[in-house]
Amino acid sequence: MGVLRVGVLAYPRCFASEVYGVPDLLTMATHLGGPDGTGYDVSVMSPRRQVSASGGARLAVSAVRDVDVLVVPGFELSPDLLLDTTLAPLAPELAVIRSHVATGNAVVSICVGAFLLAEAGLLAGRRATTSWILADELARRCPDADVCAEELVITDGGVTTTGSFSAMYDFALGLIREHSGTFVARATARLALVDDARSSQTPYVDTRLLPRAGSEFSREVMRHLDQNLADRYDLTALAATFRVSTRTLLRRFADETHRSPLDYLQASRVSRARHLLETTDRTVASISSTVGYKNPGTFAALFTKHTGQPPSTYRTAFRRSTT
């Protein structure tokens, strides 16, 4: 194959590292491929003359041109993020995305860059992913899309979306593997110290960072469950604690949080177990008991369902020093 033309679309408040992350990895691949290898013609483009990225960093940009692959980086996330306010000024960029796709060429979003693809009308009827922390919001804004929060990279009909931030490397390595071969992709991963065997966002999800849904009633129920994590789940006793019927408890909790108390309790137990696996030397059986499971096998099955990895594998991947 010949030189692959890759364009990164820069825009106001985009993450500068997501603008340059893919080009830098492709540059490494070009060097590792040698003079006889396939190369990459990469440019940072914009319909604007000047672009200030996240943190006010000024980006050097060139005019928009025809490319084989258009990469759309994510944008700066903040606690007071207002998506409509962020997306409203980006009409010129949305026009570039639509024009590029109309030619039949590939488009790729990095992290929350998926929201630009959604705004451009590209995700309807397609499978897609984005950062796990905003996957529910993407699904709400784009109900015709099949949003898969656990996936790292999804390609559907020439439209590729990726998970949070570092998933740009998973995409770039896949592109290198396709264009330059497995050897160059593997060598690039080793040189850059990038994991080339990841398959899911699930092990990285921290539910404590998600907005806590619900009113005071459901928050009180969640607080009670958190404080009694190791106790056997008893719906009747839980309803009695809050002086309501079991039916009322389930209905109000579901209306406010879109889940059941048991679902919440299981997720909370897994979250606590993850912390203990990361920070202590306690056995899996001991941790299982601490979070309310007398049978380690039952606990391991639940943990794997929630994180995509068995407890021992998770500990190996995410272990922190206890010193």
Image (cartoon, rainbow, N blue to C red):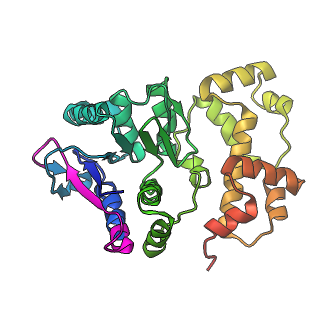
Q: Position of residue 71 (x, y in %)?
A: 33, 47
Q: Quadrant of residue 272?
A: bottom right
Establish if 39 lies above or below 300: below
Q: What residue lies at 66% left-to-right and 60% top-to-bottom? A: 275
Q: Position of residue 14 (x, y in %)?
A: 28, 48
Q: What residue lies at 64% left-to-right and 31% top-to-bottom? A: 218
In the rendered image, the quadrant that contains the C terminus is: bottom right
Task: Give left or right: position of 238 versus 110.
Answer: right
Task: Give left or right: position of 15 versus 275.
Answer: left
Q: Position of residue 316 (x, y in %)?
A: 67, 69
Establish if 268 lies above or below 38: above
Tell me if I can see residue 292 in this picture.
no
Q: What residue lies at 49% left-to-right and 69% top-to-bottom? A: 183
Stretch of the chain drawn in magenta: 29-50
Q: Which of 48/155 is in front?
A: 155
In the rendered image, the quadrant that contains the N terminus is: bottom left
On whether residue 37 falls in the magenta region, the answer is yes
Tell me if I can see residue 297 in this picture.
yes
On whether residue 276 falls in the magenta region, the answer is no
Residue extending farthest to the right is 295
Task: Give left or right: position of 240 versus 201.
Answer: right
